[in-house]
Image (cartoon, grey):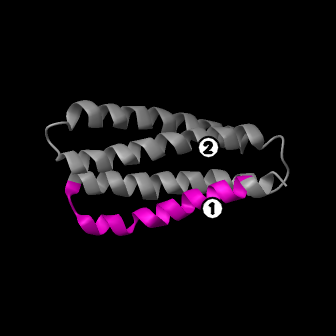
Amino acid sequence: MDKTFMFAGAVLGGLGVAIGAFGAHGLRGRLSPEMLAVFETGVRYHMYHALAILAAAALLPRIDGRAVLIAGWSFMAGIVLFSGSLYALALSGVTTLGAITPIGGVAFLVGWISLAVAAF
C-alpha cells in the first residue's frame, strides 16, 4: 500500500503542478479575479494534500494500524471532492458545485485526525 500512496502522491503532485500552470497561464483574463482565486485555492489544497499522501506512504511501513491507510485515502478523496469541486466551480460558474466542497474539507480533516491517531 505504501507504493500505492507513493504513486498516487507523485501523480497527484504532478497533476497539481499542471493544473496550477493551466490556471496561471491559461485562465488569467478568462476568469474573473474571484473565480481565479477559487481555482487557486483548489490548487493550493491539492498540492498540500498530494504531499500529505507522500507522507502517508513514508509512514505506512513504520506505523502499524489502519489510521495511516485511512489518512491516505481520505487525502485522496479530499483532493477529488474539495479541489475538484473548486476547479469545476471556477470553470463552469455553477455555484451548486460549491455544496460538494465541504465534503472534501471533511475528508481532509479525517485524514489529519487519522494521522494524529496513528501517532498514538
Direction from residue 12 to residue 67 in the image, left or right: right
Q: Nearer the viewer, residue 16 or 120?
A: 120
Q: Amino acid at mark 1?
A: Val
The residue where tag 2 is placed is 53
- Main SS of the magenta segment? helix
Decide whether residue 18 is among the magenta residues.
no
Q: Amino acid at mark 2?
A: Ile
Direction from residue 47 to residue 9 in the image, left or right: right
The local secondary structure at tag 2 comes to: helix
Instruction: Check the picture and name the quadrant holding the N terminus.
Output: top right
Q: Residue at x 36, y 58 (%)?
A: 85
Q: What is the magenta range?
A: 92-115
Tell me, yes or no, whether the two marked residues, 1 and 2, touch with CB atoms within 8 Å.
no
Q: Residue at x 41, y 51 (%)?
A: 83
Q: Which mark is residue 46?
A: none
The residue where tag 1 is placed is 110
Q: Nearer the viewer, residue 81 or 116?
A: 116
| Crowdedness near tag 1: few (<14), some (14–19) or many (≥20) residues, C-alpha within 10 Å | many
| Crowdedness near tag 2: few (<14), some (14–19) or many (≥20) residues, C-alpha within 10 Å | many
At which x and y percent is residue 6? 64, 37
Q: Is residue 75 above or below residue 7?
A: below
Direction from residue 88 to residue 75 in the image, left or right: right
At which x and y percent is residue 48? 53, 41
